[in-house]
Image (cartoon, rainbow, N blue to C red):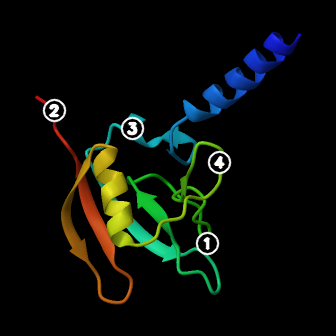
Amino acid sequence: MKTSFLLLISFFFVSFSLKAQTVNGIPLKDYKEEYLKWSAKSAGLGSRKIQVLIDFGQEARVLSNMEQILLDSTGKKMEFNSSIDVLNFMFKNGYELMQPFGTEYISFYMRKIKTP
């Protein structure tokens, strides 16, 4: 009984860890588009963390950014320490920086890294 309970708990945690970060329900690594733009927004009043909005060219509803927000494997909004933290995360997920732009709210153009 103890063994089956431990197996069940282990399966539960493994299944959550296998899920990828998602944008609009699609894992980040599964997007076929070569280019994207991401922008940072405050994680909340008084927070020093940032959340990320990702634009692949997907359709988004007016006055809603939920189709663009980056979510973790449990469906919770991801939070980062800084823009460099996000750039490192995006590089680990197969994207390279092309060009930052903007003055007040900085956004970053990125391209999927081509593998030989």
The residue singled out by tag 2 in the image is 115
Q: Is residue 99 left or right of residue 104?
A: left
Residues under numbered marks 4 and 2 in contact, where contact means CB atoms less than 8 Å apart? no
N-terminal label among 3 and 2: 3
* Residue type highlighted by circle 1: Leu
Q: Residues within 10 Å of mark 1 (few under 14, many from 20)?
A: few
Q: What is the crowding at mark 2: few (fewer than 14 residues within 10 Å), some, or many (at least 20)? A: few
The amino acid pointed to by label 3 is Lys
Q: CA distance from mark 1 to mark 3?
A: 26 Å
The residue carrying pointer 4 sits among few (fewer than 14), some (14 to 19) or many (20 or more) residues within 10 Å by Cα, namely: some
Residue lying at the far left of the rendered structure: 116
Query: x, y (%) of residue 6?
Result: 77, 19
Pointer 1 residue: 63
Element carrying mark 4: loop
Q: Earlier in the sequence, mark 4 or mark 2?
A: 4
**Which amino acid is tagged 4?**
Gly
